[in-house]
């Protein structure tokens, strides 16, 4: 009979186990960080040691390094012609930027048409602006940008917390309010900072939808029109748009243009990419606050996390409609202007994660930006992972791959299934035996009969998997980060996540894979973003520094629950060689799951060593056939565009260049 005392002891043991589990996970993460730094230093040291001119003078070394860089640049860009083409593209791109500034403003006819348009729901927008010592010229430009809206059913709520020496703020606002009854102004008894002052604005408001606007920024004249249009067409209850920072009083002098993905919960946890211009239904505030003062400085990140959780339809309008002024003292000019915002952002994300039932997580700033976070989730239990590797001959590639798994992996509960497919050398069968012996029971082989079919080979491997999770892995990969499995598992274990992909590099340390976008590339099927960028690159808006949602990830290193793999029918065997991984990820998305790319699981991928490139002869013909089938199967999704790749980007380039 179990006594209360025994139950108490069992509880103590469980608590001790959980604490030790968390402690070990933390230690593993620290080891991984140190391994990454050590690997980076070893690489740099190797370059120095192998440099025959090391003892030469510094000028000579500088000249040599310059030549090496130019040679690499020429090679990556396709030689001198490639360089000229790239320079020409950048020049045209710079000219094209004006299309997002005043050139995008409506002409008189468009203004008249939009102001006369009648919608089924003529929403009233309450635009909330907290004021504090606002420079007069910025204040006037902000108010004028609201007055110039082509959609006219709005009210502008101004709550002024300015000090006594800035009485001009009130004078300007009162003058505007006397001319236009839609402008509401209140002088506050004391400054309650951004959160408190905005909450005072909310008390003044009467609109069905709330818009949050900074006191020194500018709205595009069509912003409210685009928003009311989306509300009527898509029943949106939370909306946001693209934005840019600018300097001075000329919005055409853009500093950073932020073209955003559609709603992506993992992106939002790591980075407040939604930011401006947030507009939402007042109903989303029922039972909750607008801004919480304890997160002052990052009160918008907290609010966006809470309200998008509640929203039924979050809509991203992929148009640049918000101009964020960068000046001394603004966050746009650097987070150092408001250091308390970093703690506020970390606290907001932590509160959000706890609300979703996560415990023992860690939130750390990344090298991209202090408020762009790396989130380490606690791994629940120790589920088994089966690594599935398709192989035919290529003994040295397979040896390097499996030995790197056995030598570097810190996760304990895994095994490796090698799927043998028509190898012809005795060497590879000797290697299978060696790896099985060295693996100590972790490594085994199964045999696939018949012509090579990547999908069928992996499906067979998964059918032999004992693990709760399967990790599809190419035989031409090599592990870099020791906790690569943990970094992928922490996402794959979530009930809302389907496939998880890693960050893969070529041997020269340029990026091979950092997420897949559908429609990208010459075939308009799918392509890898940040392709061939250096390993140290931060990515577009820091996107190589945090885990994020992607439409697809490569099957060269893909983790998924075995039950989900089976639920969607595994890999489609009609895609024998190409696009089977993208197709698989789209099937997961069709079932409502998120796919995640994490940059913190890193491997080398000596791509296509095992089967060659699909760019000539029969291989090119085969790819064309499979590409055609893919375009037909996913026609609707391709027409809609990749939700995580802004339509303002070119589909001919992987570097987030503007569409020209």
Image: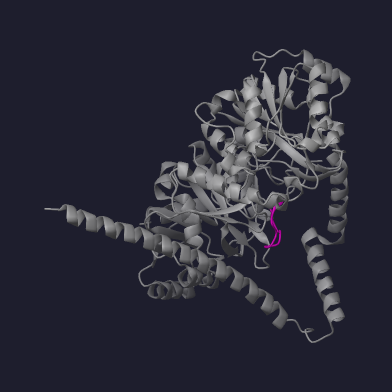
Q: Left or right? Give the position of 88 relative to 277.
A: right
**Residue 651 vertical placement versus 239 (above, below):** below
Residue 104 shows in this picture: yes
Q: Give the range drawn in magenta.
A: 530-540
Q: Which residue is drawn at 64% across and 50% down?
A: 340
**Residue 557 percent across, percent down from the top left:** 53, 57
**Residue 648 percent across, percent down from the top left:** 74, 39
Give 627 or 97, whichever is nearer the viewer. 97
As for residue 66 lying within the magenta part, the answer is no
**Residue 122 percent across, percent down from the top left:** 67, 15
Q: Left or right? Give the position of 211 relative to 573.
A: right
Q: Left or right? Give the position of 399 relative to 442.
A: right
Q: Which residue lies furthest to the bottom in this view?
A: 55
**Residue 143 percent across, percent down from the top left:** 80, 27
Quarter in which the C terminus is drawn: top right
Give 377 or 596, whichever is nearer the viewer. 377
């Amino acid at each position: 009979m179990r006594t209360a005392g025994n139950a108490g002891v069992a509880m103590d043991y469980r608590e001790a186990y959980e604490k030790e589990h968390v402690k070990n996970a933390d230690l593993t993460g620290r080891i991984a960080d140190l391994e990454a730094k050590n690997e980076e230093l070893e690489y740099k040291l190797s370059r120095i040691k192998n440099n025959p001119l090391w003892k030469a003078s510094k000028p000579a070394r500088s000249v040599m390094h310059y030549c090496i860089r130019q040679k690499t640049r020429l090679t990556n860009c396709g030689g001198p012609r490639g360089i000229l083409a790239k320079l020409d593209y950048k020049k045209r791109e710079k000219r094209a930027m004006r299309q997002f500034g005043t050139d995008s403003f409506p002409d008189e006819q468009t203004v008249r048409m939009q102001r006369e348009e009648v919608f089924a729901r003529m929403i009233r927008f309450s635009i909330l602006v907290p004021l504090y010592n606002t420079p007069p010229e910025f204040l006037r430009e902000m108010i004028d940008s609201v007055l110039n809206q082509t959609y006219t059913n709005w009210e502008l709520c101004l709550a002024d917390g300015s000090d006594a020496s800035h009485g001009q703020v009130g004078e300007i606002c009162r003058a505007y309010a006397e001319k236009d009854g839609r402008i509401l102004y209140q002088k506050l008894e004391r400054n309650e900072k951004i959160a408190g002052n905005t909450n005072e604005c909310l008390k003044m408001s009467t609109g069905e939808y709330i818009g949050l606007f900074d006191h020194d920024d500018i709205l595009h004249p069509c912003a409210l029109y685009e928003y009311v249009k989306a509300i009527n067409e898509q029943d949106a209850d939370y909306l946001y748009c693209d934005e840019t920072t600018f300097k001075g009083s000329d919005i055409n002098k853009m500093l950073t243009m932020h073209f955003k993905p559609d709603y992506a919960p993992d992106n939002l946890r790591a980075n407040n990419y939604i930011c401006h211009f947030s507009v939402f239904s007042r109903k989303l505030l029922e039972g909750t606050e607008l801004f919480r003062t304890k997160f002052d400085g990052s009160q918008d990140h907290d609010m966006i996390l809470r309200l998008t959780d509640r929203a039924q339809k979050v809509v991203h309008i992929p148009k640049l409609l918000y101009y964020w002024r960068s000046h001394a003292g603004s966050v746009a000019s650097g987070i150092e202007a408001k250091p308390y915002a970093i703690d506020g952002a970390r606290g907001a994300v932590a509160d959000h994660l706890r609300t979703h039932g996560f415990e023992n997580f860690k939130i750390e700033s990344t090298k991209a930006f202090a408020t762009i976070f790396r989130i380490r989730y606690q791994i629940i239990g120790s589920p088994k992972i089966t690594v599935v590797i398709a192989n035919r001959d290529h003994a040295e590639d397979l040896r390097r791959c499996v030995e790197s798994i056995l030598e570097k992996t810190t996760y304990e509960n895994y095994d490796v299934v090698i799927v043998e497919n028509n190898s012809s050398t005795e060497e590879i069968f000797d290697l299978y035996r060696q790896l099985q012996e060295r693996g100590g029971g972790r490594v085994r082989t199964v045999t696939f009969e018949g012509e090579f079919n990547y999908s069928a080979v992996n499906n067979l491997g998964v059918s032999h998997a004992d693990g709760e999770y399967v990790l599809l892995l190419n035989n031409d990969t090599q592990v870099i980060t020791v906790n690569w499995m943990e970094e992928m598992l922490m996402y794959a274990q979530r009930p809302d996540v389907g496939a998880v992909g890693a960050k893969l590099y070529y041997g020269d340390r340029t990026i091979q894979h950092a997420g897949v976008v559908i429609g990208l590339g010459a075939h308009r099927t799918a392509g890898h973003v940040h392709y061939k960028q250096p390993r140290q690159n931060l990515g577009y808006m820091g996107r190589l520094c945090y885990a994020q949602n992607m439409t697809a990830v490569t099957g060269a290193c893909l983790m998924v629950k075995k039950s989900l793999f089976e639920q969607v029918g595994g890999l489609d065997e009609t895609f024998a060689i190409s696009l089977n991984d993208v197709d698989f990820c789209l099937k997961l998305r069709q079932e409502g799951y998120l796919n995640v790319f994490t940059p913190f699981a890193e491997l080398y991928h000596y791509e296509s060593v095992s089967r060659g490139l699909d760019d000539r002869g029969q291989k090119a013909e085969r790819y064309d056939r499979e590409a055609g089938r893919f375009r037909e199967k996913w026609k609707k999704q391709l027409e809609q565009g990749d939700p995580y790749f802004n339509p303002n980007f070119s589909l001919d380039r992987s570097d987030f260049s503007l569409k020209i």
